[in-house]
Image: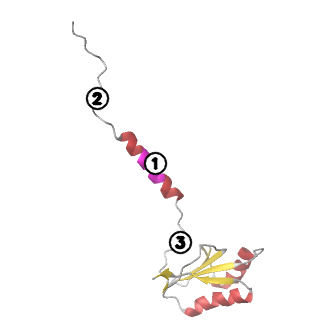
Amino acid sequence: MKLKGRNKVSPEFSMSSMTDIVFLLLVFFMLTSNAPNALDLLLPKAKGKSTNTQNVSVTINRDLEYFVNNEQINAEYIEIELKKALEGQDKPTIILRAEQNVAIKEAVNVMDIANRNNYKVILAVRPK
């Protein structure tokens, strides 16, 4: 009498569940990753390193558009927006991100506002 087992193990392997898991992980990391520079700027090069401790960032792009914390504002209202953003801070700090081809007078204007209000200014640069 021959007895055959009815439960045969199939040597095939389904990759569909594995690809689902990889896809979900990819979506998760893309959504939770930090994108510190929402504006694409070509910063000037310099030695040294930038700090990540910032209270407010001011960005000037090549079209002379001003952004305070990635919100576009008119150049006339920079000082008002900075005062609103930095009120109540112990050591108010501004990260100045001026694109490489922006005239120096635009950056000096923001530095002058910071000097009048006793704000510390850090110039963001690209490492060499």
Q: Residues within 10 Å of mark 2 (few under 14, many from 20)?
A: few
Q: Amino acid at mark 1?
A: Leu
Q: Nearer the viewer, mark 1 or mark 2?
A: 2
Label placed on residue 127: none
Disc 1, SS: helix
Residue beneath disc 3: 37
The residue lying at 53 percent from left, 71 percent from top is 37
Query: Which quarter shows the C terminus?
Result: bottom left
Distance, label 2 to label 3, CA atoms, is 51 Å
Q: Amino acid at mark 2?
A: Ser
Mark 3 in CB contact with mark 1 (< 8 angstroms) = no
Is the magenta region chiefly helix, strand or loop?
Answer: helix
Image coordinates of residue 42 in percent, x first then y, are 47, 80
Q: Quadrant of residue 69?
A: bottom right
In front of the other: 77 or 6: 6
Q: Residues within 10 Å of mark 3 (few under 14, many from 20)?
A: few
The residue lying at 71 percent from left, 89 percent from top is 115
Label placed on residue 10: 2
The residue lying at 72 percent from left, 80 percent from top is 80
Q: Amino acid at mark 3?
A: Asn
**Vertical side of 34 occupied by 122: above or below:** below
Instruction: Using residue 3 as the reference point, say whether residue 118 is left or right of it.
Output: right
Residue beneath disc 1: 24
Q: Is residue 19 magenta?
A: no
Magenta stretch: give its range: 21-27
**Vertical side of 115 occupied by 89: above or below:** above
- N-terminal of the two: label 1 or label 2? 2
**Vertical side of 8 occupied by 62: above or below:** below
**Vertical side of 83 occupied by 20: above or below:** above
Mark 2 in CB contact with mark 3 (< 8 angstroms) = no
Distance, label 3 to label 1, CA atoms, is 25 Å
